[in-house]
Amino acid sequence: MQVGIDNFMSEALRNFFMLVFLIVKCTQMSVAAELVNNYWL
């Protein structure tokens, strides 16, 4: 039972970190786009 809980926790943590990583990546992309628009316009 403990192994199942550990696997579930590690899987949830992995998914959580992937989500955070994607959000940060999208935020950086939008910020970069803002900077490019500000400089080019």
Image (spheres, helix red, strand yellow):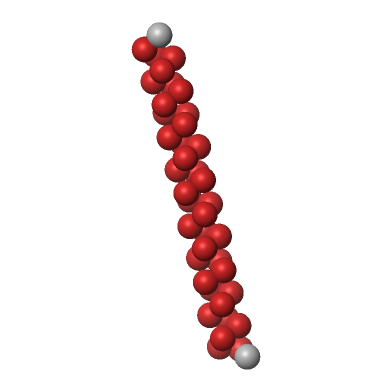
> Is 18 on the left-hand or right-hand side of 40?
left
The image position of residue 5, as x and y in percent, is 41, 18
**Foreground of the two, 5 or 39:** 5
Most distant residue in the right direction: 41
> Is 35 on the left-hand or right-hand side of 2?
right
The image position of residue 6, as x and y in percent, is 39, 20
Residue at image location 57% in from the left, 68% down from the top: 30
Quarter occupied by residue 34: bottom right
Q: Quadrant of the C terminus?
A: bottom right
Residue at image location 52% in from the left, 63% down from the top: 27
Total labels: the figure holds 0
Most distant residue in the top direction: 1
Residue at image location 50% in from the left, 37% down from the top: 15
Most distant residue in the bottom direction: 41
Question: Relative to 38, is 13 above or below?
Answer: above
Question: Relative to 15, is 31 above or below?
Answer: below
The image position of residue 7, as x and y in percent, is 43, 21
Residue at image location 46% in from the left, 23% down from the top: 8
Q: Quadrant of the N terminus?
A: top left
